Every structure is written in structure tokens, then in C-alpha cells.
Amino acid sequence: MSTEYGTWLRDTPLILGMMRLLDHPQLLRAQTLAGWISHQVDQGLDVFDHADIYGDGACERHFGKALATAPGLKQKIRVITKAGIVPGHLDTSRWQTKHYRAEADYLRQAIDGALQRLQLEQIDTFLIHRPDPLMDAGAVARVLEQAVANGKISHIGVSNFMPDQWRWLQQHTSLPLVCNQSELSLARADALFNGQHDAMLCDRLRWLAWSPLAGGQMANAVPEDLVSEAREQTGLCLNGLAVAWIRQLPGSPIPVLGSLKPERTAAASAGACTSLPRPLWYRLLEAVRSAPVP
């Protein structure tokens, strides 16, 4: 099993998700975006999460153009990207149906396409975006192994997979799956009780937690007086508390922050570096579950 769990992104407190890049028109000028990327690196945030479906590839293209304007910047960052989902509006068949394509040829082309759009020589980590019931695990594994051997990607992983799904793929390759990017937040914590988090630990996959702020839903789930008391003790706002709560789990899951708003990035960064008192950690869990700890 993987020996890289302890070192892969070991010192990364937070990953910046690029899914909503197009929502920030001020960043779409290449030099401006390059400056923003450089600033994040200076703040200790050097890992950026992409996918081929984010903006139908436009997010990767803008990011790549920015890197091209700043010689040396690409050597300071690490990029994660994903592929394997075909949205309905991109389905060229008569069915116009969203579907998954964890197919060998499709993923081979997806890796090459991502390299072109991002203007990179190598992608740090490539993920299969969703489990595909029709996946030929052996054929997919061979494509991923060849991409690593050719220097196109450094690491492989999965996204939104359940334990038996990632184990089926892992059986077909000697390369370690280094991560599973899946939803996890204070408000979406079922994985802590259904065995999924324990399986990640047993199989030494790093959890990359998408939607760590639960899409803003926690504001309605955590009482204001609890947030105020917690802020007095920790100095963290609700978003910071949410990130600190995730980071404190065994295996140190890494939140993938979907918002590019400076105030949310600052709050998340503060939370990623703060340890919560154990009673507060459980009190927050009680609040969102509306039930006492058994």
C-alpha cells in the first residue's frame, strides 16, 4: 500500500479550488491572475485544484495563460486536476446526457488536454473525477501508469470514490492512490460514522475535502452564541472554525476552498493552523447534528 501518505502534501494546510475562477472577472487578465497566484504562494498556499469541466476548460486555460506571463511561477506551485465527467451540454451524442468516461482513451486525451490548457510540462496530481460503473480498471490503470512513466503526471488519485471503488482500481496498479477528493465538512460529517474516513486512514489516502464550508449552510446550523464564545477562545470566525474542525481529524484532511474571496481565504488559512480544544470540537459537532454525543 502507499508509502506516500505521510509526505504527499504533508505541509499543505489548504488547497485553493479554481472552480469559480470565472466568477471573478478581475482575475481573468493573465498578468493580474499571475500576480494573484504569486501572492497566494507568498502566503504559503501553493496548491491549486482544477478540473476539465470547470468553465468547460476555461478555468484551466486562464490559469495557464497566467503562468505563461510569469517565468518561474510554475516551478513554485503544484496543480491538481480531474477528468472523467461529461456534462450533458457537452455530450455530442443524440442523448445529450451527463455521463462518466473513466475510459483509457478518454483519460489519455484528458491528461494531454489539461497539460495544454494549463501550459505545464507536468501535472502534480491527476484524479478520476467520479467513479464510473463502466470503468475497465485494468485499462485505466495502464493509462495512468504510462502517463506517470512519461512524466506527464507525478501522482494519481480519485475523487468521490467509496472504499470498494478505489480499492478495485488500486488492485490493478502498483502506483499508490495518494488521495480521494470527496465532500467533508462540519455539516456533512457522515463519513466519520459510516466507516469511510476510517477506510481512508487504513488505505493511507489523503482526504481532500471539497465544500469544507458546506456552501454557507453552517451559518444556520451553528448558534450565534456558540460561534461568539468559540471566537473568544480561539480567535476564529465560523469559517475558520469549520476548517480547523476538519484539519483536526486523524490524517489531517486538506480543505479544498471553493471561494476565492480574500476574507474567506484568510479565515480558512487561520483555521487551518489552529487546534481546537477537544470539548469545543465535539460541541460544534453536536450543534450541527442537533443531537448530543452518544
Image (tube, rainbow, N blue to C red):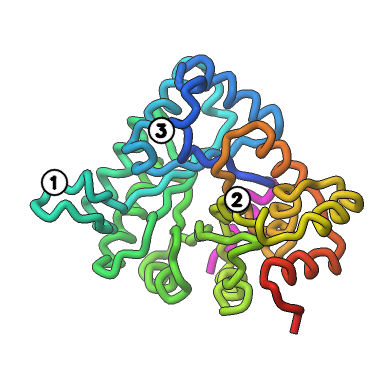
* The quadrant where residue 206 appears: bottom right
* The quadrant where residue 22 appears: top left
Number of marks drawn: 3
Mark 2 belongs to which amino acid? Answer: Gly
Magenta stretch containing residue 157, yes or no? no
Earlier sequence position, callout 1 versus callout 3: 3
- How would you rate the neighbour count of disc 2 (Cα within 10 Å): few for under 14, some for 14-19, many for 20 or more? few
Earlier sequence position, callout 2 versus callout 3: 3
Instruction: Give the residue number, with chain letter if any, for mark 1.
Output: 92
Residue 250 point in image, percent of width and height: 70, 66
Residue 51 point in image, percent of width and height: 40, 44
Earlier sequence position, callout 1 versus callout 2: 1
- The residue lying at 67 percent from left, 72 percent from top is 289
- The residue lying at 22 percent from left, 45 percent from top is 89
The Cα atoms of the two marked residues, 1 and 2, are separated by 35 Å
The Cα atoms of the two marked residues, 2 and 3, are separated by 23 Å
For this view, does 93 lie left or right of residue 246?
left
Question: Which is more toward the observer, 244 or 47?
Answer: 244
Magenta stretch containing residue 3, yes or no? yes
For this view, does 35 lie left or right of residue 143?
right
Task: Write down the region rendered in magenta.
Answer: 1-11
Q: Quadrant of the C terminus?
A: bottom right
Question: Which is more toward the observer, 224 or 216?
Answer: 224
Mark 2 or 3, which is nearer the eye?
2
Mark 1 belongs to which amino acid? Answer: Thr
Question: Which is more toward the observer, 140 or 245?
Answer: 245
Mark 3 belongs to which amino acid? Answer: Cys
Instruction: Give the residue number, with chain letter if any, for mark 3.
Output: 59
Residue furthest out toward the bottom: 294
Instruction: Give the residue number, with chain letter if any, for mark 2.
Output: 216
Q: Is residue 293 above or below residue 30?
A: below
Q: Secondary structure at mark 1?
A: loop
